[in-house]
Structures are given as structure tokens and as C-alpha cells.
């Protein structure tokens, strides 16, 4: 064999070795990234289990529903009436609910997170003096991950929902509890952790003591960053918003980017009765589209949730950690989701002495909680 041929073979073998080394390094990097995110997700699940607020045993639904009782009975007579018959052969146990002849158990593995859009346009979350300047929660949603059925659901709560709101002084001292729009609960506190925790308590109390696994309160100024972070969202405009953005014509098919997303999710004409409900419908529509788009982007780039979480840090108050965020994003990407899984608590808007008031339909809310958070005992 000639010297030239030998040199050629050496060069060829050298190239092959370089290619092998390159792919070995690449595979090692990919495996390292996968392992890193697996560890993040594992730690996230452990943290979520540890940090849950509320418990199944504390829920008020376990006593049964009494909607069919004659309201004309006095307190003693009503207390002597069983709310619902127990199904034959089904025993009572902690957390079990009996309703219209059926028994239901809470889905113990279900994960529920309170997500709020706060009416603050500052670039960063700023701690406020104790009192009532923490900003209103103009968007209130529960994001529900159900490992039992492998489903993702979202429950919308009207910001004008009348419920128990705890009032606090400028010194952070509890003053009293009043009936008011749930959105104002966030205003009491410091505009950060205390305000978010007050909201978490108020929402849980509204929903019969529902356990909540975490919260995230995001300033409305972050809408553009969130929207553009997944490449924007396509939708059909539900109501005319050309007063603020000429592209937002009712019925138009648009690709929301930048300020347009902010106007679509934040603005409303307060001179129009029940305009908060119209905005809530836009928010529900957008969330469905956003989740679909975010799931696609996550499959293309698994690091997206962690990067967005870190970028949104200055705009939000949350008890979620990067580990929790990584776990939840991975879980959500695996679960089934349809736009019909975006539900809302039904009720009626009326004009109060000064502001609009939304009163929930107690029967509908009770049944919605049973449907999403409970499974029937067979």
C-alpha cells in the first residue's frame, strides 16, 4: 500500500473519530439537560405537596348540600333534616360528599393554582404600604391539573363576585370582614406576598375551603411579554375595541402581538353595564388559545417555561419556584385540554349602590366543584 493511500485512510479515520466524539458530546449534553429538568420536576412535585394551603378535611362540602330544604323551616327543624340520602352500601368517611343520592370523593392528587392579573402597570412589582393600595385582582383564574383523568382545566371567577373580604389597617392588623367584590381583597396588604395570600384565602373560602396548591399574581404590564414569549396568539375578536386599537374590530381574525394583547385582555368600557363580564369572556377565549400555543412551543423547546418564569420574575408575586414551574409545565404539556375545559362560575350581575356586583349561583358552583374536583364513588 502506498504512503498516499495510508495517509488518506488516516485522515478518513480521523474524521470518523471526530464525528463520533462530536455526537458523543452532543448526546451527553442532551442527556444532561434532560436529567436537569427531570430533577427540577421531581423537586417541584415534592415542594407542591409540602406547600398546599387548606385540606380536604377542611372543606365545607363534606356535610352535604341543602338546597332542597324548605327555607320556611326554623333553624332547629332544618338542622334535623338530612340534606341528601346516603347511597346504599356506601359508608361516610372524611371528605366524602353525598349529593342527590350519590357519593363523591375528592381527587387527592389534583393540583390547583390561583392565577391573578393585577391592575398595576408598573414595570416591576412594588411593595406598598399596608392598607388598600395593593391593586385589584382584575383577572382571577384557577388552573387545575387532574392526574386522575389526565386533564387540564381552568375555572374563571368574575372579579365582581360578592363574597367575604377581610379588611386590614395600614399597620397590617385585621379590622373586620365585609361583603365586597373579591377583586378588592388583593388591595389590602402590601401589594406582594400578603396581598396574594389574602386573595388565596378569599378564593378558597368562596369555594367551600377548596385546597389551593399555589398562587401567581402577575402585573398586567407583563401581558405583552407573556404573549410574545410563545410567539403571539391567533383568535377572532369578540367585541369591538377599536377605541384603543384599530386592529381589534369585532369578528376580525388577528394575530395578537405586543400592545394589542394588552388591550385585548386588560381594557374595557366601564361606562357599559357588565363590561367586566365581556372582558372575562375575552380572557377565557385568550387563555384557551394561549395554552394551545404554549403547549406547541414547549414541545419544540422544553426550556421555555423555565426561561419565561425567570424573565417574568420582576412582574409577579408567586410562591412557585423554578422547580415547581418546570414540573407543572411538563405535566400540562402531557395532559388533554380542550377549550370547553375553560369553565366559569355562573351567576348574575346587578348594579349595587355604587359599583356592579356579581352574585354566584350557589347550586351551579357547588355542582361545578363536584364535577372538576371530585369523583363519584362506585
Image: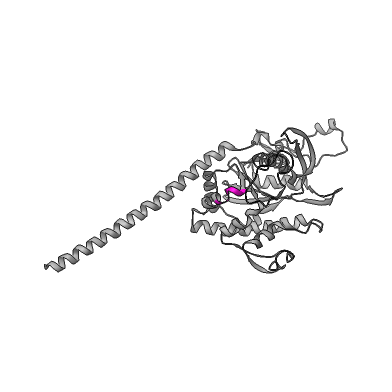
- What percent of the width, then of the height, locates residue 229? 56, 58
At 58% from the left and 37% from the top, the residue drawn is 51
Looking at the image, residue 165 sits to the left or right of residue 234; the answer is right
- What percent of the width, then of the height, locates residue 22? 32, 57
Outermost residue, top direction? Answer: 76
Residue 48 drawn above or below residue 31: above
Q: Which region shows up in magenta?
A: 311-315
Q: Main secondary structure of the magenta part?
A: helix
Q: For residue 23, which quarter of the picture? A: bottom left
Looking at the image, residue 277 sits to the left or right of residue 307; the answer is right
Q: Is residue 15 visible?
A: yes
Q: How many marks?
A: 0
At 54% from the left and 39% from the top, the residue drawn is 47
Q: For residue 82, which quarter of the picture? A: top right
Outermost residue, right direction? Answer: 72
Looking at the image, residue 48 sits to the left or right of residue 274; the answer is left
In the rendered view of the protein, which quadrant contains the C terminus? top right
Residue 345 drawn above or below residue 248: above
Foreground: 124 or 165? 124
At 58% from the left and 42% from the top, the residue drawn is 109
In the rendered view of the protein, which quadrant contains the N terminus? bottom left
- What percent of the width, then of the height, locates residue 280? 72, 55
Q: Is residue 91 visible?
A: no
Residue 34 included in the magenta stretch of the image: no
Amino acid at each position: 500500500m502506498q504512503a498516499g493511500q495510508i495517509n488518506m485512510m488516516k485522515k478518513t479515520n480521523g474524521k470518523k473519530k471526530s464525528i463520533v466524539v462530536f455526537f458523543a458530546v452532543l448526546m451527553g449534553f442532551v442527556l444532561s439537560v434532560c436529567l436537569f429538568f427531570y430533577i427540577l420536576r421531581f423537586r417541584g412535585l415534592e415542594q407542591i405537596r409540602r406547600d398546599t394551603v387548606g385540606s380536604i378535611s377542611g372543606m365545607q362540602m363534606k356535610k352535604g348540600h341543602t338546597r332542597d330544604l324548605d327555607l320556611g323551616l326554623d333553624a332547629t327543624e332544618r338542622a334535623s333534616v338530612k340534606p341528601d340520602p346516603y347511597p346504599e352500601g356506601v359508608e361516610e368517611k372524611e371528605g366524602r360528599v353525598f349529593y342527590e343520592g350519590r357519593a363523591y370523593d375528592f381527587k387527592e392528587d389534583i393540583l390547583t393554582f390561583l392565577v391573578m392579573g393585577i391592575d398595576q402597570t408598573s414595570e416591576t412589582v412594588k411593595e406598598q404600604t399596608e392598607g388598600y393600595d395593593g391593586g385589584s385582582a382584575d383577572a382571577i383564574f384557577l388552573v387545575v391539573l387532574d392526574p386522575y383523568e389526565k386533564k387540564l382545566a381552568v375555572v374563571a371567577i368574575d372579579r365582581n363576585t360578592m363574597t367575604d373580604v377581610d379588611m386590614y389597617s395600614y399597620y397590617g392588623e385585621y379590622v373586620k370582614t365585609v361583603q365586597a367584590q373579591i377583586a378588592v381583597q388583593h388591595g389590602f396588604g402590601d401589594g406582594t406576598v400578603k396581598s396574594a395570600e389574602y386573595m388565596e384565602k378569599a378564593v378558597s373560602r368562596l369555594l367551600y375551603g377548596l385546597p389551593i396548591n399555589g398562587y401567581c399574581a402577575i402585573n398586567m404590564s407583563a401581558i405583552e411579554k407573556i404573549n410574545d414569549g410563545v410567539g403571539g396568539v391567533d383568535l377572532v375578536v369578540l367585541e369591538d375595541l377599536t377605541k384603543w386599537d384599530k386592529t381589534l374590530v369585532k369578528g376580525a381574525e388577528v394575530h395578537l402581538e405586543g400592545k394589542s394583547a394588552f388591550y385585548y385582555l386588560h381594557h374595557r368600557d366601564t361606562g357599559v353595564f357588565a363590561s367586566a363580564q365581556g372582558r372575562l369572556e375575552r380572557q377565557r377565549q385568550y387563555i384557551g388559545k394561549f395554552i394551545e400555543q404554549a403547549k406547541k412551543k414547549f414541545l419544540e423547546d422544553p426550556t421555555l417555561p423555565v426561561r419565561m418564569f425567570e424573565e417574568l420574575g420582576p412582574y409577579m408575586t408567586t410562591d412557585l419556584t423554578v422547580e415547581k414551574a418546570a414540573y407543572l409545565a411538563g405535566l400540562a404539556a402531557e395532559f388533554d385540554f380542550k377549550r370547553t375545559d375553560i369553565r366559569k362560575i355562573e351567576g348574575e350581575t346587578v348594579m349595587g349602590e355604587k359599583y356592579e356586583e356579581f352574585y354566584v349561583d350557589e347550586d351551579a358552583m357547588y355542582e361545578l366543584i363536584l364535577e372538576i374536583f371530585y369523583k363519584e364513588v362506585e
